[in-house]
Image (cartoon, rainbow, N blue to C red):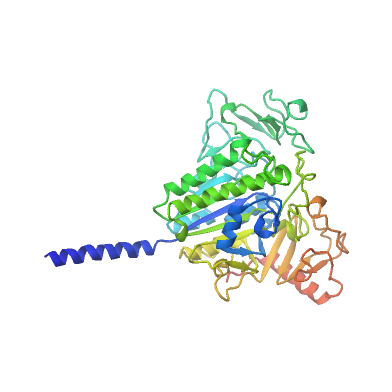
């Protein structure tokens, strides 16, 4: 009897170990905001210190040709969560803070797919994909939102730091709202008697460069009008800490089962208001300070995974929603304080641009014991998260899900002989095409280089109207238009782009 009992105990232990070994890996995506290809140390930055991000790169796989889909935030985030190029759907441009939800509930989104596969899904940080169905009552239940498209939990800012309402939303309600001080929001006309940056510039602790002259919150005027909700309004200086604590709390609460965390820090988007711990610490002004603050948030998330002994069963990806911007509405000295720092690195353009600096972003994948440290030149894109993570979770998705999402999991994990994408559409109002080392910008597309300070590269020949073709292997800065010398390539690329634009993808 004793022998049988020992056998049963041992069998139970081995069975438990087997179950533990079969647990699906956790997935953490950290999506920084407006962080450029050259903004962190492992991509060449020297005037800002990013030790936590650099450590991820040293322990994981650093990609040098990874992309978001669009060079601005709302369409980029839409693509990441839906697996669909944003240009395919109207209304996916940069949204006001009171826009309705642009992802339809019931759709097979990234969190919904992982939820079907047994994951708990949480969203923390910047949202900017709309809430409700229009005319939101900010004082009651606010839905549909993240919970209606697949997340189990959310703690978000509705839009951006420079747009009202300047409050946090947890699940369906505003955090800390006093019912006796109801919130009103308008993007058409002033509401209440709140002072504005336009009428009271003397009240501002951060001056304007253009726009952003509506309601003043925390000494900073925003886009849009807001009244009420004083107890619920955020402190910009504490925002990074607040969001990071919520992200690590989600990890702690779900440590015993597979989870997906979509953590979208506000840094380094405007207004750039670092906590006192980071203010003045970098060598290139306030923009550098918030880059270092973002790095601190990354460090906190990694520390939580390590402390809970989850790192070896967690795929962690760090990336950015689009390329960099310097002067984006506030006179914060970012341009004058660059001090030789090049936010886009060797790339041309940045946020709002069709050139590589608009969508080629930092991208690091870390999974100790699974991903061999190194550097990859595979062409990959955030639109592929849906199909790739579904494959990682062992979940088959329907053909209707993620119409532009390809399974590039092998490339993300750095598997030998694994390939990334063959083609990629880049979006900034208009469209461009990547195929191998070739970059094609169609005739009439000026490239969106409306922010010269971001790369300050000379305009390419024919930028005003003719097609543009660049060999990125020899001209990563897109300065030499090769269209006239390679008419056959221009023709081929134009045909491919036309076909992809009209027909969508064929998932591999």
Q: Residue at x 71, y 28 (%)?
A: 190
* Residue 489 can be seen, yes or no: yes
Viewer-nearest residue: 503 or 382: 382
Q: Is residue 98 above or below residue 262?
A: above
Q: Quadrant of the N terminus?
A: bottom left
Q: Where is residue 90 in the image (x, y as percent from the top left)?
A: 68, 52
Q: In which quarter of the image is the C terminus?
A: bottom right
Q: Where is residue 486 in the image (x, y as percent from the top left)?
A: 83, 75
Q: In this view, does 230 lie above or below 11?
A: above
- Residue 357 in which image quadrant: bottom right
Give the left or right position of residue 404, taking residue 7 as reference. Answer: right
Q: Residue at x 59, y 36 (%)?
A: 238
Q: Where is residue 149 in the image (x, y as percent from the top left)?
A: 52, 50
Q: In this view, does 278 lie above or below 44?
A: above
Q: Is residue 284 above or below residue 461?
A: above
Viewer-nearest residue: 361 or 145: 361
* Residue 149 can be seen, yes or no: no
Q: Which residue is drawn at 54% across and 51% down?
A: 262
């Amino acid at each position: 009897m004793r022998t049988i009992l020992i056998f049963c105990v041992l069998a139970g232990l081995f069975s438990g170990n087997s179950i533990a070994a079969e647990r699906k890996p956790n997935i953490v995506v950290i999506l920084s905001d407006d962080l450029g290809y050259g903004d962190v140390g492992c991509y060449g930055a020297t005037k800002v210190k990013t030790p936590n991000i650099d450590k991820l790169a040293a322990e994981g796989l650093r990609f040098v040709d990874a992309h978001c889909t669009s060079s601005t935030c709302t369409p980029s985030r839409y693509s990441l969560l839906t697996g669909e190029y944003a240009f395919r759907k109207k209304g996916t441009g940069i949204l006001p803070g009171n826009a309705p939800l642009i992802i339809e509930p019931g759709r097979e989104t990234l969190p919904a797919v992982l939820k079907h596969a047994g994951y708990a899904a949480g969203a923390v940080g910047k949202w900017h994909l709309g809430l409700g169905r229009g005319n939101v009552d900010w004082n009651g239940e606010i839905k549909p939102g993240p919970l209606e498209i697949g997340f189990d939990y959310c703690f978000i800012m509705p839009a951006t730091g420079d747009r009202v309402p300047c409050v946090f939303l947890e699940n369906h309600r505003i955090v800390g709202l006093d019912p006796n001080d109801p919130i009103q929001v308008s993007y058409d006309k002033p509401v209440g008697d709140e002072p504005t940056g336009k009428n009271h510039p003397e009240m501002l602790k951060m001056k304007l460069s253009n726009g952003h002259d509506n309601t003043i919150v925390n000494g900073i005027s925003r886009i849009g009008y807001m009244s009420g909700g004083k107890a619920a309004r955020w402190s910009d200086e504490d925002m990074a800490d607040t969001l990071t604590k919520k992200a690590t709390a989600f990890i702690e609460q779900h440590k015993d089962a597979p989870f997906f965390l979509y953590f979208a820090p506000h840094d380094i988007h405007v207004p750039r208001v670092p906590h006192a711990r980071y203010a003045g610490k970098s060598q290139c002004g306030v923009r550098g300070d918030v880059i270092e603050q973002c790095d601190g948030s990354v460090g906190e998330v990694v520390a939580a995974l390590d402390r809970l002994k989850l790192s070896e069963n967690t795929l962690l990806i760090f990336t950015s929603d689009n390329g960099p911007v310097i002067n984006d509405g506030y006179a914060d000295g970012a341009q004058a304080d660059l001090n030789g720092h090049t936010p886009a690195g060797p790339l041309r353009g940045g946020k709002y641009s069709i050139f590589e600096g608009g969508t080629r972003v930092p991208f690091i994948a870390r999974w100790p014991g699974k991903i061999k440290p190194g550097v990859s030149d595979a062409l990959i894109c955030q639109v592929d998260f849906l199909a790739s993570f579904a494959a990682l979770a062992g979940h088959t998705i329907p053909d209707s899900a993620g119409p532009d999402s390809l399974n590039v999991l092998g490339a993300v994990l750095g598997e030998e002989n694994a390939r990334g994408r063959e083609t990629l559409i880049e979006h900034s109002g208009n469209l461009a095409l990547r195929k191998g080392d070739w970059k094609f910008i169609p005739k009439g597309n000026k490239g969106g280089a409306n922010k010269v300070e971001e790369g300050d590269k000379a305009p390419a020949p024919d930028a005003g109207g003719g097609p543009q073709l660049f060999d990125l292997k020899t001209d990563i800065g897109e300065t030499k238009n090769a269209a006239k010398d390679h008419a056959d390539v221009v023709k081929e690329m134009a045909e491919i782009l036309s076909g992809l634009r009209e027909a969508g993808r064929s998932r591999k």
